[in-house]
Amino acid sequence: RSGEMAKLTQLLDNEAFRAYATYATIVLLKMMSMSLITAYFRITRKAFVNPEDTASFGKGENAKKYLRTDPDVERVRRGHLNDLENIVPFLGIGLLYALSGPELSTALLHFRIFVGARILHTLAYLIPLPQPSRGLSWAVGYTVTISMAYKVLKTALYL
Amino acid sequence: RSGEMAKLTQLLDNEAFRAYATYATIVLLKMMSMSLITAYFRITRKAFVNPEDTASFGKGENAKKYLRTDPDVERVRRGHLNDLENIVPFLGIGLLYALSGPELSTALLHFRIFVGARILHTLAYLIPLPQPSRGLSWAVGYTVTISMAYKVLKTALYL
Amino acid sequence: RSGEMAKLTQLLDNEAFRAYATYATIVLLKMMSMSLITAYFRITRKAFVNPEDTASFGKGENAKKYLRTDPDVERVRRGHLNDLENIVPFLGIGLLYALSGPELSTALLHFRIFVGARILHTLAYLIPLPQPSRGLSWAVGYTVTISMAYKVLKTALYL
């Protein structure tokens, strides 16, 4: 079966596909870091949502007072959800775009701008920076995804 | 490297894969439109969640009164989350299904029904249409995804 | 076009890719089951969020009292969102990992542990089991995804 393995590996020999693999992995790792930041704020702010998470703080009212929302926790969670809403389209459309035979330099431009914009979006959300920082970084990532979608539909359209 | 590029492009020469690329891109663009609709309702209803988003309305109580939830905004957000919950499985299972060698006509039927059902689901959610419109359109998309998952597992099962 | 179809099918001849297809489909079906469990609790607890969903219970106050949150419904919804946050990275990174030429036994180990951990996470969330059951099962799935990301970046890095 080394023949098929070779064919598979060829997919990762293609530079545009390797660039996709690299930037998709980086932006997914960034998204995953939101879970750790949420956990950090939940623990330092003592703000939990599941009763079983506060059991170590004692019983009854002692534990119950930590079942509450905290503005910092909610902020990270909104950033995380915004990541899901924007990174899922990037993953799907970006994969198809990488398979649509783009110029390597154009593909790199798309991937780099998208990932950069999403990192800025997270910084703008968490610091937080004054608007329109967050709005603009969101719009840049959104526009890059639309641009890739246009290329995919132009290359592959089959209704 | 034009040899490998050619091999990659061959993936998009396969008609079932091209159909997947087309319908996956369309349904992701539809999901992305939910962000714009949310922004539209947030701005027209003046209902925001981040303090930095209301800074342009003035300071103190003047701005604070726009930090509130609005039924229309919440409705779009629920539709968006429902999209994520259903379109993510379609993206993953649909990609594997397109690679599993389905009949082109069968594949087109699956993709068209799924995307049509999700567009109806959004309309049923946003207008809103009386039930069971939303429930049925959800169930149709769900069933299509299960049907593709069955084909993938029948073709590829390797535990 | 049977030539191209053959090439595509070869992707599913590769055992590591077949294993990915199998486990990705299983974990997506698991995630999809969260929708059914949410619906089950909404109906049995009579706890809805959309006014049109309570129309069958009568009009006015009769129906309005079922527009409420229920702890069991909210618990399933949190489990569902946690699935999205963790299964989306697995889908993207796992696909690239399966294409990066891993040892079959190593790939199977990654996929099996991830899917097992996510099933345990759901059980720990829904029963619920005392902590750290849920935390540990979350951390195991997270670590497996990081390990696959490392292999992808080592094989494909192209910045």
Image: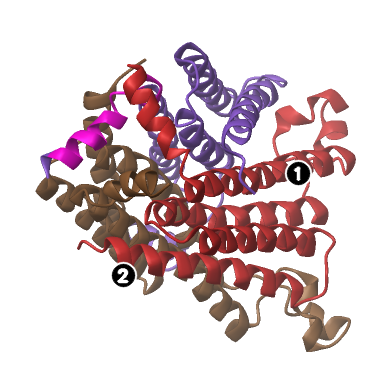
Chain colours: A red, B brown, C purple
Number of the label disc, if any, that sits on residue B129: 2
Residue C59 visible: no
Query: Which of the pair C66/B146 is nearer the observer?
Result: B146
Kindly state the secondary structure of the residue where label 2 is placed: loop
Q: Chain of mark 2?
A: B
Between the C-alphas of marks 1 and 2, the distance is 37 Å
Q: Position of residue A137 (x, y in %)?
A: 68, 69
Q: Which residues are magenta?
A: C3-18
Q: Residue at x 50, y 40 (%)?
A: C92
Q: Residue at x 41, y 42 (%)?
A: C35
What is the quadrant of the N terminus of chain A in the image? top left
Q: Is residue B130 left or right of residue A59?
A: left
- The answer to whether B36 is drawn above or below residue A117 in the figure is below
Query: Which of the pair B109/B96 is nearer the observer?
Result: B96
Q: Position of residue B146 (x, y in %)?
A: 27, 37
Q: Amino acid at mark 1?
A: Thr
Which secondary structure dominates the residues rendered in magenta?
helix
* Residue that carries the numbered disc 1 in the rendered image: A38
Kindly state the secondary structure of the residue where label 1 is placed: helix
10 Å neighbourhood of mark 1: few (<14), some, or many (≥20)? some
